[in-house]
Image: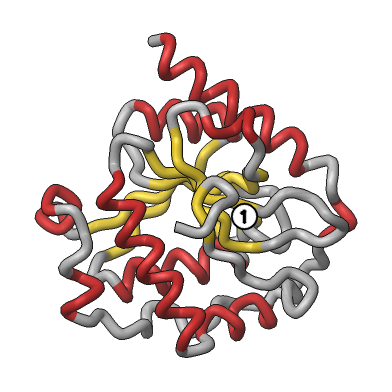
Amino acid sequence: MKGVSRVVAGLAVALAVALLLPGCFSNDDGGAVGSGTGPATASLGSRVPPAVRRRGTLRVGMVAGRPPFAVLDPGSSTAKGADVDLVTQVASSLGLKLEVTNEADATAGAADLSGDKVDVVMAGTLDTPEARNGVDLIDYVAADQGSAPVAMAVPAAQPGLKVALMAALKAMVADRRYEAILSRWNLAPRALPVITVNGTPP
C-alpha cells in the first residue's frame, strides 16, 4: 500500500504542476490524425511483453480536460486530442487494440496503474523527481518556457512494456507520423518530441 500511495502522490503532484502551465500549448478541436494506420511490424510487435501480447490490447488511462492533449467530446463522451492520436498510433504500431479508460483525475489514473487496471497513464504529467515514485516516465513532448517534459507513466516493474512503447514512439518520429500529430494539435515546432525516460535518453 505504501508503494501505491507513493505512485498516486507523485503523479498527482506532477499533474498539479502541469495545470499551472495553461500558456504552454494552444488547442485545436479537430479530429484524430491517421487513427489506427500505423504499421504493425514484426520487430515492434516482438517487443511487446507476452502478457500484453496475449491480451491483445493496450490499456490506457486518460485524464481529459487537458487541451490540446485530451478533452472529452461532449457528443460522444470519448476523449480526443494529441494524446489520443499518439497512443492510437502506438497501439497500432505494436499490433494491439487500444482500450481507453477515462480517468477522473491523476489520482484515479495512478490508482488504476498500481492496481494493474491500465498499462499506461496519460494525465499531462510533467517529468519531475516527485512524479517518479514507483513509475517510469516516458517523456514524449517537450513543453516550452523551460518547463519539464510531458510524460506518460508506466509501471517501473514493467521494463518490457517501456521498451516496446519507446520503440513505437521512435518509429513514429522516424516516419514523421509523430510530427504530423503534434502539428495537427498545434504542438509543433514549439513542443518537439524528446522521447526519453525519466529525463534521460535510454
User: Which residue is nearer to you in this view: 60 or 173?
Assistant: 173
171 vs 23: above or below: below
Percent coordinates x, y for residue 71 in the rendering: 65, 56
The residue at the point 16 percent across, 68 percent down is 46
195 above or below 147?
below
Q: Is residue 49 left or right of residue 9?
A: left
* Residue 61 x, y percent position in the rendering: 45, 45
For residue 29, side relative to residue 173 (left or right): right
Q: In which quadrant is the C terminus drawn?
A: bottom left
Quarter of the image for residue 143 reads bottom right
Three-letter code, disc 1: Leu
Considering every residue shown, the one lying at the far front of the view is 201
136 w.r.t. 167: above or below: above
Q: Residue furthest top?
A: 2
* Between 14 and 85, the one nearer to me in the picture: 14
Measured as percent of width and height from the top left, residue 120 is found at 41, 47
Viewer-proximal residue, 160 or 92?
160
Crowd class of label 1 (few under 14; some 14 to 19; many from 20; radius 10 Å):
some
Q: What residue sits 30% from the left and 46% below the top?
A: 159
Q: Can residue 77 be spotted in the picture?
A: no
Quarter of the image holding residue 179?
bottom right
Question: Residue shown at 67%/81% (left/top)?
Answer: 184
Image position of 136 (left or right of 190): left
- In the rendered picture of this protein, how many numbered marks are placed on residues? 1
Q: Position of residue 93 (x, y in %)?
A: 32, 75
Residue matched to label 1: 72
| Secondary-structure class at tag 1 | strand
> Can the viewer see residue 20 in this picture?
yes
